[in-house]
Amino acid sequence: MATSNNAKILNLEAGADLSAAHFLLVKGHTTANQVVLAGNGENAVGVLLEPADAAGKAVAVAAGGIVRAYAGDTVAVGAQVASDAAGKVVTAASGDQILGVAVTAGAADTMMEFVWEKQGAVA
């Protein structure tokens, strides 16, 4: 299974049922070392590579290098990317946390790749 290229892999725990979050963006949870699905423009910690069906179970998260994730809409090569409300990758908009730059194009609900490189919020 192709998941990432030169990615830094974090071993964390699910903060909720993440069984349907494979290749989606996740963020830190209120409990240390746990992640939950990222929302619109939020500061994600990575892309979920190994989902879990309950809180407290181990998950793997890609947080560096070139990572694969589902697109939430059309994303052009070279676009700065962010999370949408469903944890999918979209073109960053005003106020969004920039998570990286697209290296392949994406269309809604298709896999795409981006370089994980946080750049702060879009002005």
Image (cartoon, grey):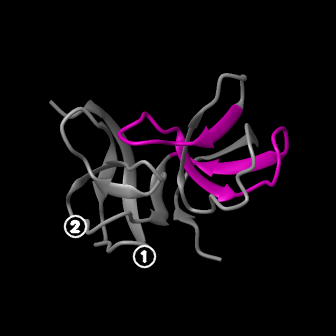
Which residue is pictured at 40% across the width and 70% down the height?
112
Instruction: Locate residue 35 relative to residue 13 in the image: left or right.
Output: left
Residue 44 among those drawn in magenta? yes
Q: Which mark is residue 77?
A: 2
Q: Quadrant of the N terminus?
A: bottom right
- Find residue 121 and name its label: none
Percent position of residue 53, x then y: 81, 54
Q: Are marks 1 and 2 in contact (CB under 8 Å)?
A: no
Q: Percent position (x, y) of residue 85?
A: 43, 48
Label 1, residues with CA under 10 Å away: few <14, some 14-19, many ≥20: some
Task: Please state the total of marks drawn on the protein image.
Answer: 2
Residues rendered magenta in the picture: 34-63
Give 12 or 87, whichever is nearer the viewer. Answer: 87
Up-down: is 40 above or below 20?
above
Number of other residues with Cα within 10 Å of mark 2, as a class: few under 14, some 14 to 19, many 20 or more: some
**Where, by quadrant of the figure, is residue 102 drawn?**
bottom left
| Residue 111 covered by magenta stretch | no
Q: What kind of element bears circle 2?
A: loop
Mark 1 or 2, nearer chain start? 2
- On residue 110, the disc is 1
Q: Residue 41 location, x and y as percent?
A: 35, 39
Q: Position of residue 22 (x, y in %)?
A: 63, 62
Eyeballing the image, is 61 above or below 1? Answer: above
Label 1, label 2: how far apart the Cα atoms are: 14 Å
